[in-house]
Image (spheres, rainbow, N blue to C red):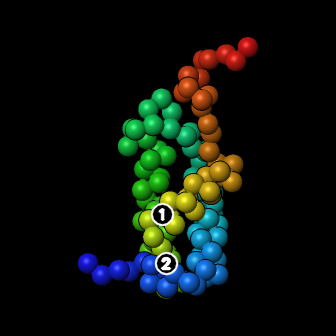
Amino acid sequence: MAIRYTLWLDPDDTPRHRAVEAELERYFIARFADYPHIRLFGADPYDYDAPFNRLYEVLMARAGEYCEREWRYVPTPEQLNRAFFLAVGHSNKFLRDNDDGDPHRSDS
């Protein structure tokens, strides 16, 4: 299997890697705007059919293709993952349950 990831092929081109990572974060935030609010995880974070998990899979694939097409850059899975979760953290489209996942819990 040939190495394809741009970061691995040219590790010293830090400005380009950082620029693409920032663009990826913006890409994800823009894609989130296409969806209604999404509840993070819910009762079972391992429910792979949950909306958040399905969204993750779809957007990761699309972002990789977008990078190759628009920037001629092949991001590593780690770059995609980091940009995705940074975008989740900066987006107002995600709703969080209480830390224990129990929406009926009272902190009082």
**Residue 2 against residue 37 in the figure, above or below:** below
Residue closer to the observer: 16 or 67: 16
Quarter of image, res 58: bottom left
Three-letter amino acid code at the position of disc 1: Glu
Q: Quadrant of the C terminus?
A: top right
Residue 62 image point, x, y percent: 46, 68
- Earlier in the chain: of badge 2 and badge 1, it is 2
- Of helix, strand and loop, which one carries label 2? helix
Mark 1 neighbour class, 10 Å CA radius: few under 14, some 14 to 19, many 20 or more: few
Residue 31 lies in what quarter of the image?
bottom right
All told, the count of numbered labels is 2
Q: Which percent across, then down, holds residue 19?
A: 64, 77
Label 1 secondary element: helix
Residue that label 1 marks: 78
Residue at x-position 49% and y-position 46%: 52
**Camera sees residue 79:** yes
Question: As shown in the figure, which amino acid type bears the numbered disc 2?
Answer: Leu
Left or right: where does residue 35 sit relative to residue 44? Answer: right
Residue 38 or 86: which is nearer the viewer? 86
Q: Within 10 angstroms of label 2, few (less than 14), some, or many (20 or more) residues?
A: some
User: Mark number for residue 7?
Assistant: 2
Q: Position of residue 5 (x, y in %)?
A: 42, 78
Report the residue at 67% width, 16% height from top.
106
The circle on residue 52 is: none
* 108 in relation to 61, above or below: above
Q: Residue at x 35, y 80 (%)?
A: 3
| Residue 20 percent across, percent down from the top left | 59, 76
Residue 34 in sight from this viewpoint: no
Which quadrant, please, contains the N terminus? bottom left
